[in-house]
Image (cartoon, grey):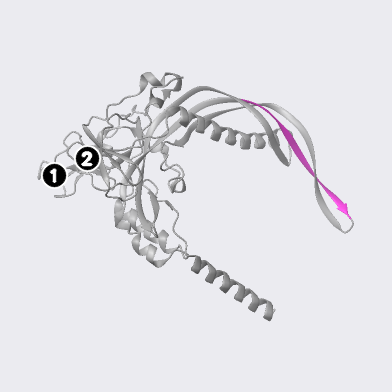
Amino acid sequence: MDSQIDEQIYSPIEKTEDVTDKKCPNCAATVVYDPATRGMLCEYCGYRKELPAADSGDAVVELDFDAAEHLESFDWGVDKKVVICSSCAGESVYDALETAAVCAFCGSTNVMPSATEKSIAPGGVCPFEIPINNAGELFGKWLKRKIFTPSAAKRQAKPESFVGVYLPYWTFDTSTTSTFSGQAGFDRRVKRGDRVETVTDWRRVSGIYQEMIDDFTVVASKKNESSGVKRAEPFVFSKLVPYRPELVAGFVAERYSVGLKDGWTKAQSGITERLKRNIEGYIKKKWNADRARCQSLSTVFDNVTYKYILVPVWLSSFTYKNKVYQFVVNGQTGKVGGKAPISALRVAIAILLGIILLALILNYS
């Protein structure tokens, strides 16, 4: 299908603070979402406001994939301005009165105005639960355990530099019916001389396997799909709530750069790999086999629905020896992800010490 969604491929970031009672009644400063209390907070005078609990029947709506072009909303409820980072090409969308001077992804100050305006609003949000101070502590502990990371790099990676970012995800539900062929393996013990070996007898099998797939996720960001974000998963989708501007007030929200159709293509590939593993388990159970191989399968995907959602991360980046390193703290669970720089000298010393220790052990054994 020629979806309207896939004709608009962006890689921007949005900041939404234009919400009801946005201004603090005490000092007129901007009120933002506070992960620690799950309410609104004025960071200047301490004013707090509780958010109403979701209605008992309130749920994130699953959208029909085939009718996607008719169901998307572009209403974030905010007038926006867009800036683009000349260093990493990331686009950021902020409230019209906000000042944007630093790119949330690479930390560059080389940002300039952009003419891009449109953005699809998400259907659901997983709100932040980990406050920024906790995120910094968790990151500090994680970095201390990286014994091969140079001290100079550790000094540059400052926990206080984290920015709260909502990342875009597609989630897909579908019922699957797969025709498969493969092999069931049956082990037996065989004595060969003084040794007893395990020999597997393989038998060809085939059949039909059905499975309902719920909330298969695809990172909708080309910038972050292969970054530390995957290392900080999973997110708790049972805590997903319908989108409200209050939940993203004070945070950056990246707009998707992987379109719906591309997202579904990635999902099909991932779902097929999952089905292959599950079919091998099915073969073992059905034929009472010790081993299994799923050699080929053909799958029909029915009743495909999707959601466009935002998930919370604390994001930090720093440059070490002209290379940008990005670190992520899961805003729900506190799990840290990222790839720290490695000192070749430290690795060489560790290997040398290991060789010396091994030689000493062999010498005294």
Placement of 1 over or under 186, stated as above or below? above
Residue found farthest to the right: 193
Q: Position of residue 133 (x, y in %)?
A: 30, 55
Does the magenta portion include 57?
no
Work out whether mark 1 precedes mark 2 in sequence or the reverse, and give the earlier one: 1
Q: Position of residue 111 (x, y in %)?
A: 27, 44
Residue at the (11%, 42%) spot, across then down: 28
Q: Position of residue 188 (x, y in %)?
A: 81, 45
Residue at the (15%, 50%) spot, across then down: 44
Residue at the (31%, 51%) spot, across then down: 107
Placement of 201 over or under 307, stated as above or below? below
* Image quadrant in which the C terminus is located: bottom right
| Image mark count | 2
The kind of residue on which mark 2 rests is Glu
| Of residues 31 and 188, the one drawn nearer to the viewer in this rendering | 31
Q: What residue does disc 2 label?
A: 50
Label 1: which secondary element = loop
Residue at the (58%, 32%) spot, across then down: 272
The kind of residue on which mark 1 rests is Ala
Q: Quadrant of residue 339?
A: bottom left
Q: Position of residue 202 (x, y in %)?
A: 78, 38
Placement of 63 over or under 130, stated as above or below? above
Does the magenta portion include 187?
yes
Q: What residue does disc 1 label?
A: 29
Check disc 2: other Cα within 10 Å, few if <14, some if 14-19, many if 20+.
few
Q: Which residues are magenta?
A: 178-192
Q: Please state if 334 lies on the left or on the right of 23 as rendered.
A: right
Prevailing SS of the magenta stretch: strand
Label 2: which secondary element = loop
Measure the alpha-carbon separation of dots 1 and 2. 17 Å
